Image (cartoon, grey):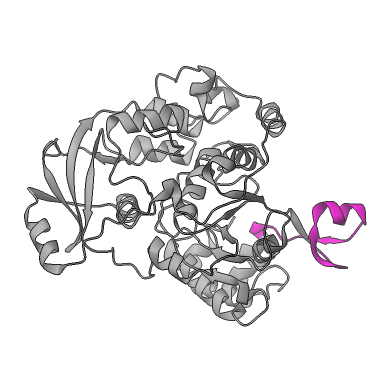
């Protein structure tokens, strides 16, 4: 498969490829592996049946690096040699490292671990791990042996003891992790233009949670509030939830892979994502409104809401594994995998980088090892006769489908027109209308 090329012995490209418009098309990407449809079919043919999922934390232990004693926090902070400010992506990574969301890691990856994850999607100890967790820097003071106070403004977040410093082959990293080296891919663009030249690995001591407009609870806090002895089905999203999404994750509770009385944990990512996505704070406001609106319904009583400080890479199949690992640490047994999970399109041609079912197939392949059961999402459409049904049912019964494009939806929001309730919740529409800059990003 093109996103785990080491297994196929495919050499990485020697340089990033810039976006090129015009008649060059796919040739500008320098692909050495293609035929996505054929790859997808071959994977589907060898998918193993999933094992019973477990509520046990990933790797059997829950990392918690947070220091709770205030005097000890002060002592640790004062032991640092110097301080650096975290950007938004680093802030998300450090928070998840410190609270155990990225168990079993205890800090940004050293060179050995980084290379093993990039090439083999595994830690040196052999366990599967989707994407590398790194700390990029151009600061010449960031060298092995130094203790660095990591800050969010005036707030002390953590102290990192640096163990090594290395210069990554970013092109190779992107080819292995994203299957691409073109800057048309948002993840490649992020690695090439946002990350500094060097990476440092080390260990963390957590001092304080970051301050946000919304609370992101720790794995321990989330797990403590989840019911025992039933399946916990995670739903990941990075966009406002409309009617089709709601039907998708509530119906997943009745999927054949899911046990009786299961609960859905709606766990949106509210950190940085690709440039044309709606801002995390606005997304959060839509989730709060929807949770309040639906809490007393039959479906709402089987739904829990929490928020994840995670920065999206748009890495498709490998990011699906990352999400499953993280939700395992938050106490989930099942994970809903949508069509083109964590996928993205070329910023020039609009072509999809991954096939519609690549993430689903990859998740099914690795689900048994992770101890998380993938739940493939239904392809739902709205019909005049029977409300939301699967696309297959609508076609078989010749039902009248109703559709509303992103362009039309945006136009109606702008004009103040009534949005049909079969498409969007009124509460979500009200939040979006209060932030018209976000409306312009709806696709």
Picture quadrant where residue 172 is located: top left
Q: In this view, does 381 lie to the left or right of 73?
A: right
x 42%, y 46%: residue: 59
Camera sees residue 181? no
Residue 36 visible in rendering: yes
The residue located at (61%, 69%) in the rendering is 413
x then y, percent, for residue 344: 55, 43
Badge count: 0
Q: Which residue lies furthest to the right in this view?
A: 397
In the picture provided, is 408 more to the left or to the right than 217?
right
Q: In this view, does 405 lie above or below 289?
A: above
Residue 388 among magenta residues: yes
Q: Residue 316 in the image: x percent, y percent? A: 54, 41
Residue 370, image x, y percentages: 52, 44
Nearer to us in this view, 233 or 305: 233
Q: In this view, does 406 lie above or below 261?
A: above
Q: In which quarter of the image is the C terminus?
A: bottom right
Q: Give the range drawn in magenta.
A: 383-407
């Amino acid at each position: 498969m093109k996103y785990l090329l080491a297994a196929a012995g495919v050499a990485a490209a020697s340089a990033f490829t810039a976006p090129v418009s015009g008649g060059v098309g796919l040739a500008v990407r320098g692909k050495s592996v293609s035929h996505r449809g054929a790859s997808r079919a071959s994977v589907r043919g060898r998918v193993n049946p999933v094992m019973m999922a477990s509520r046990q934390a990933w790797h059997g232990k829950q990392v918690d690096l947070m220091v709770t004693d205030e005097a000890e926090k002060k002592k640790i902070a004062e032991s640092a040699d110097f301080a650096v400010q975290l950007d938004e992506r680093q802030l998300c990574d450090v928070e998840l490292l410190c609270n155990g969301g990225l168990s079993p890691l205890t800090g940004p990856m050293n060179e050995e671990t980084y290379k093993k994850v990039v090439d083999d999607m595994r830690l040196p100890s052999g366990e599967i791990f989707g994407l590398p967790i790194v700390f990029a820097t151009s600061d010449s003071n960031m060298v092995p042996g130094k203790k660095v106070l990591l800050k969010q403004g005036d707030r002390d977040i953590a102290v990192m003891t640096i163990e090594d410093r290395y210069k990554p082959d970013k092109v190779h990293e992107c080819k292995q992790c994203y299957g691409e080296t073109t800057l048309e891919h948002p993840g490649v663009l992020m690695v090439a233009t946002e990350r500094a030249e060097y990476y440092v690995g080390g260990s963390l001591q957590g001092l304080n949670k970051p301050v946000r407009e919304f609370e992101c609870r720790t794995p321990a806090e989330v797990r403590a509030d989840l019911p025992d002895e039933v399946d916990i089905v995670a739903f990941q999203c990075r966009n406002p939830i409309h009617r089709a999404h709601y039907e998708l994750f509530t119906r997943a509770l009745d999927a054949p892979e899911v046990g009786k009385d299961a609960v859905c944990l709606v766990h949106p990512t509210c950190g940085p994502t690709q440039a044309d996505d709606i801002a995390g704070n606005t997304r959060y406001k839509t989730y709060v409104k929807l949770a309040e609106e639906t809490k007393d319904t039959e479906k709402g009583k089987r739904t829990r809401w929490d928020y994840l400080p995670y920065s999206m890479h748009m890495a498709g199949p490998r990011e699906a594994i990352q999400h499953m690992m993280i939700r395992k640490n938050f106490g989930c047994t099942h994970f809903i995998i949508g069509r083109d999970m964590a996928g993205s399109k070329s910023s020039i041609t609009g072509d999809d980088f991954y096939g519609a079912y690549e993430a689903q197939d990859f998740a099914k392949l690795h689900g048994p090892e992770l101890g998380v059961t993938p739940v493939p999402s239904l392809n739902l459409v709205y019909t005049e006769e029977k409300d939301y049904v699967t696309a297959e049912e609508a076609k078989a019964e010749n039902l009248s489908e109703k559709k509303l494009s992103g362009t039309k939806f945006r136009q109606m929001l702008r004009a103040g027109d009534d949005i049909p309730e079969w498409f969007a919740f009124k509460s979500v529409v009200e939040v979006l209308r209060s932030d018209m800059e976000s409306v312009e990003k709806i696709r």
